[in-house]
């Protein structure tokens, strides 16, 4: 089952909108309602201030960004009661999906960002990342969360990592060994490492 357009005004989507939080924190870590947070690093953190991302690696990571995101969802599925119903937002800056008109009701607006909102099975997303596509090739998801809002993955366009919020147990599962992910605990209010 592929994802379908979602109503961005639904409570299950509007929980991302929190005017009391700095927008940068929301797009980096999602809602500030969780017991614990982590950063899943697609590439290692910079070694020094001002380091260029292009100078970060001699070799590409073993897993692509998409494969790492798939793995994050797979780990987190153990920590939701609604693995077959979830949501994703895709930043509109990647462009309109090919061959599909985006309904106005599916557009979610946050300060400085606008997204296309879709819903579907998170289990399907783990099995086939292209199921995130409404039409055309799958873009990078900016947010992914289950309908029960047990956790949220946030992946803004600039950082070299994805922020994840969830229960202490969910975050421990991400940062514990055996996942193949480079995940570390994080505090959303702190300055986060970044490349220039």
Image: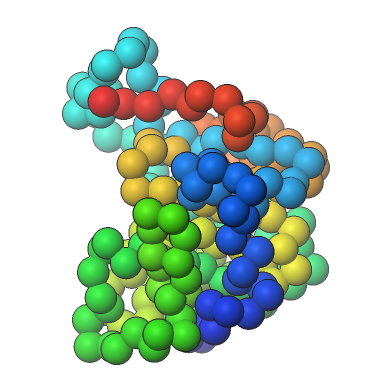
Q: Is residue 92 above or below residue 70?
A: below
Q: Position of residue 170 (x, y in %)?
A: 74, 46
Figure coloring: rainbow
Residue at 66% across, 38% down: 37
Q: Is residue 160 visible?
A: yes
Q: Name the foreground residue: 119 vs 177.
A: 119
Residue 102 spot, x, y in % from top left: 34, 84
Q: Position of residue 80 (x, y in %)?
A: 76, 63
Residue in the picture at 29% in, 88% down: 101
Q: Quadrant of residue 142?
A: bottom left
| Above or below, comparing residue 35 to residue 141 in the picture | above
For the point 43% across and 76% down, the residue is 107
Tell me if 167 is positioned left or right of 38 in this view.
right
Asked whether 194 or 182 is in front, the reply is 194
Which is more toward the observer, 190 or 82?
Answer: 190
Residue appearing at x 44%, y 55% in the figure: 111
174 left or right, relative to 128: right
Number of marks in picture:
0
- The percent position of residue 167, horizontal first and vertical second, equals 78, 46
Choose between 58 and 26: the one closer to the eye: 26
Q: Is residue 66 visible?
A: no
Residue furthest toward the top? 48
- 69 vs 104: above or below: above
Q: Quadrant of residue 138?
A: bottom left
- In which quadrant is the C terminus drawn? top left
Say which quarter of the image contains residue 86. bottom right
Q: Is residue 38 above or below residue 29?
A: above
């Amino acid at each position: 089952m592929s994802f379908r357009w979602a109503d961005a005004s639904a409570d299950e989507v509007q929980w991302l909108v929190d005017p009391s939080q700095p927008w940068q924190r929301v797009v980096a870590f999602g809602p500030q309602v969780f017991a614990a947070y982590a950063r899943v690093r697609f590439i290692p953190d910079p070694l020094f201030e001002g380091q260029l991302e292009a100078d970060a690696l001699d070799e590409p990571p073993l897993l692509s960004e998409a494969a790492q995101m798939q793995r994050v969802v797979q780990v987190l599925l153990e920590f939701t009661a609604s693995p077959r119903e979830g949501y994703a937002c895709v930043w509109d800056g990647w462009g309109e999906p090919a061959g599909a008109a985006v309904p106005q009701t599916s557009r979610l607006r946050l300060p400085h960002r606008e997204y296309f909102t879709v819903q579907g099975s998170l289990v399907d997303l783990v099995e086939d990342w292209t199921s995130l596509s409404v039409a055309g090739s799958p873009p990078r998801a900016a947010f992914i969360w289950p309908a029960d809002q047990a956790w949220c993955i946030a992946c803004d366009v600039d950082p070299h990592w994805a922020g994840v919020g969830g229960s202490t147990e969910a975050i421990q599962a991400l940062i514990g060994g055996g996942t193949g992910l480079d995940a570390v605990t994080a505090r959303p209010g702190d300055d986060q490492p970044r490349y220039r």
